[in-house]
Every structure is written in C-alpha cells, then in structure tokens.
Amino acid sequence: MMPNMFRYAICNETFQDWPMDRAFAFARQCGYTGIEIAPFTLGRCATKISAQQRADVWRQAKTAGLEVVGLHWLLAKTEGFHLTSPEKCVRNKTADYLCELARLCHDLGGSIMVLGSPQQRNLLPGVTKPEAMRYAADVLNGTLRVLEECGVTIAVEPLGPAEGDFLLTAAEGRELIELVGSFNVRLHLDCKAMASEALPPAEIIRDNHDLLAHFHANDPNRQGPGMGQLEMKPIFQALKEIDWRGWVSVEVFDYTPGIERLVRESMANMLAVS
C-alpha cells in the first residue's frame, strides 16, 4: 500500500471549551499533524494577544507534535472592519488589522490565513459587486508588505449563497486574486462551499490548482468530511491528480455529534478515500 500523501489538520474551535493542551494532544492521537487557529479562541482582538500567550500556544502545539497551519475566521467577532466598505478609512483599518493577524500567524508558526468572514465582506447598501471587488483588492494590497515580511499567504475563501453575497464562487475568488496580483494572495477551497456551485467540486479543484493555497474538508451538513451526503472520494482523487501537497484541514460548524466523534470520524473518513 502506498503511503498517504496528504497532511491533515483540524481547526481548534472544534474542541470548544477543551484546554489547548488537551485538544492538541487528542488531535495528534487521532492522526492529525496540523492545527488551525481561530483568533477569537485566543482573544477578541489580535492586538491584545500577548507575546507570552503566542509563545505558549506555539509551545503547546509543538509539545503535542502538531504544526500550526495558520489562522481562519480572521474577522469573526470583531467590530469596525469590512473588506468591501466604500469608506477608505474602514478599508485602511481592515488592512491594518489583517497585518496584525499576519504577525500573529507568524508568531504562532503558521503561514496561511484563510479569508472567509462573510459578515465582514458582504455587500453594503449601494455597493455593486464590481465596486466591492475593487475595494477588497484595495484592502489586500494594503497587506502585501507585511505578508511578505512574515512569510504569510492570505487564502481567499469563496463561500456559498447561504453564507453571504460576495465571493460566492471559485471564479470570483480568482478574479479578486488576479486583481491583486501577488503570490501572497491565493485561493482557498472548502468542500461545503464548493457543493453550492454548479460545477462538481472535483472539477473546481482541477480548474484552480494553479492558485490553490489551502483546503478545508467538511460536508454541506456542516459536520465533518464523510459525515453527510457529499461524496468525498472524487474530491480526494482530484487532490491526488493535482499533486496537492498542502494541508487538508477539517472545519466543522455543527458540533452535535460530539467533539470526539467529529475528530475521530473525520479522520477515518478521509483516510478511507485517500
């Protein structure tokens, strides 16, 4: 049997109120080698997360045998930031905060920041999609110097219409990325989001392999990969075909099956199809 080619991670908010060291140890026990961090689990504002706290999380991950992949839910539970605001001062403030998140990501040992946060990018009254695309590019352009300094990539995350009204498809994600034109701004694909598109997820993966920087495995039912109706085997086959060497990171939103089942079953289901 050929060794599995994928690197598996899981998002830390999956563990809800578990202490970090317990969560990290359990993730490693289940076969994950990476952990992805939601900044709001460390503090409501990145500027308030101390150097000591950053060092502690890095140490806890390393002790457990995990690599910190990076950050996601970048703007969740924050106030005053918006990716597509027509107000230049708001866009500048948002760019500055993303720069601070890049520094946090670097301090934790990560290199990827998944830019989802639909509530902080949805179209505001009177803003058209072309205008929003230009405003979003303006924000991202304001982060490039710090991204380069920190060795961090922002991975733009398309989300389906159930989540918002801006950047709904991989094609729209490509449009924004190409408008910015930086190797530090690439594409993120998510199984749940891809399932809302007209094209099959495997085709979306193949079509966008040149920009892909990060990948989330889950199901449209908001649980883990293989825990719903979405067929995972073609998705993992497409990842093999593009020779994907980045992370496959589990992100769930419905915790009703329980933490331990979500973590274990997600890994088992991925291994079964990869």
Image (spheres, helix red, strand yellow):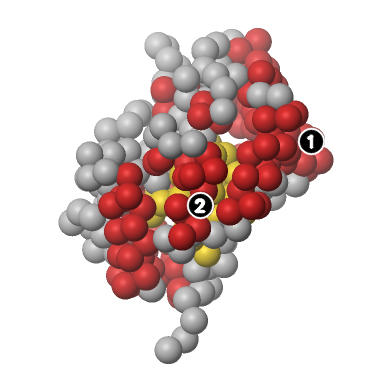
Amino acid under disc 2: Ala
Q: Image point 71% across, 24% down: which residue?
A: 50
Name the quadrant of the C terminus.
bottom left
Q: Is residue 202 left or right of residue 188?
A: left
Q: Nearer the viewer, residue 41 or 181?
A: 41
Residue at left offset 26%, top offset 59%: 226
- Name the residue at the bottom extreme: 1
Left or right: where 265 falls relative to 30: left
Q: Quadrant of residue 95?
A: top right
Amino acid type at image mark 1:
Arg
Q: Is residue 264 visible?
A: yes
Measured as percent of width and height from the top left, residue 47 is found at 68, 20
Which one is earlier in the sequence, the residue at label 1 or at label 2?
A: 2
Dot 1: within a 10 Å radius of its alpha carbon, few (fewer than 14), some, or many (20 or more) residues?
few
Label number found at residue 145: 1
Q: Which mark is residue 25?
A: 2
Q: Nearer the viewer, residue 218 or 255?
A: 255
Asked whether residue 130 is in view, the answer is: no
Q: Secondary structure under badge 1?
A: helix
Residue 5 rendering spot, x and y as whole percentages: 51, 74
